[in-house]
Amino acid sequence: EDKVVQSPLSLVVHEGDTVTLNCSYEVTNFRSLLWYKQEKKAPTFLFMLTSSGIEKKSGRLSSILDKKELFSILNITATQTGDSAVYLCAVQGAQKLVFGQGTRLTINP
Amino acid sequence: NAGVTQTPKFRILKIGQSMTLQCAQDMNHNYMYWYRQDPGMGLKLIYYSVGAGITDKGEVPNGYNVSRSTTEDFPLRLELAAPSQTSVYFCASSYEETGELFFGEGSRLTVL
């Protein structure tokens, strides 16, 4: 059965800190890995990764995939209170998109 | 563009009642999905559709039914509601099978 595990489940940091969120997976016929940010309502798309070692970057957020070790990380530098959210990792395999349980990130001023 | 529209946003049901969650998208996406999200958990796939007339089960289909008579609409029906179906339901669509999902705002359902 396809599985996606995120760690940590919860993280509290101060504004300005850098954080790294982890996502490991066991998926048959891997096709892509996606990161989403979820505030109060629907998840919003951040990144889609398909190739190992190629960093995707958007402002203070970046992500990279390691298909050999079966994991991805999401980095957020110079965190702001607006980064507080649940970050979801999802992997597309033979089944449809399978989500991890999410990391709840809280940024304190 | 409205994107993905779900109705209702909130609903309280009694045990044994039935209801339909509506989902419509105006992006001409072939792929549509229904997920549920329980508190503190990720999203679990209930049903999905790869095009009009074609639906298939996801991870947690029991107690639900879907239909896809048009490209735009993908309603989710709950028969004989149970407290275990208390959750937030998200409808989503995508242009490609491996592409970005676009989500609706969610429907919060409580079964008492």
Image (cartoon, coloured by chain):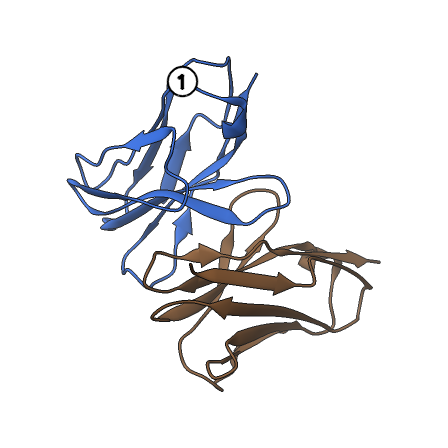
Chain colours: A brown, B blue
Local secondary structure at mark 1:
loop
Residue marked by disc 1: B80
Chain letter for the residue marked with disc 1 in the picture: B
- Hey, what amino acid is under mark 1? Leu
Q: Is the residue A60 above or below the residue B76 in the image?
A: below
Residue A101 x/y as whole percent: 58, 53
Extreme residue in the front direction: A1
What residue is at 42 percent from the left and 13 percent from the top?
A: B17
What residue is at 49 percent from the left and 61 percent from the top?
A: A3
**Residue B95 horizontal side relative to residue B106, left or right:** left
Q: How many marks?
A: 1
What residue is at 54 percent from the left and 75 percent from the top?
A: A71
- The answer to which quarter of the image holds residue B99 is bottom left
Extreme residue in the bottom direction: A53
Residue A27 x/y as whole percent: 42, 67
**Residue B8 visible in this rendered orientation of the protein:** yes
What residue is at 26 percent from the left and 35 percent from the top?
A: B73
Residue B28 x/y as whole percent: 23, 48
Q: Is the residue B1 above or below the residue A100 in the image?
A: above
Q: Quadrant of the N terminus of chain B?
A: top left
Residue A32 x/y as whole percent: 39, 70
Q: Of residues A86 and A95, which is closer to you in this image?
A: A95
Pointer 1 local density, CA inside 10 Å: few below 14, some 14–19, many at least 20 = some
**Residue A74 horizontal side relative to residue B35, left or right:** right
- The answer to which quarter of the image holds residue B67 is top left
Q: Is the residue A1 above or below the residue A21 in the image?
A: above
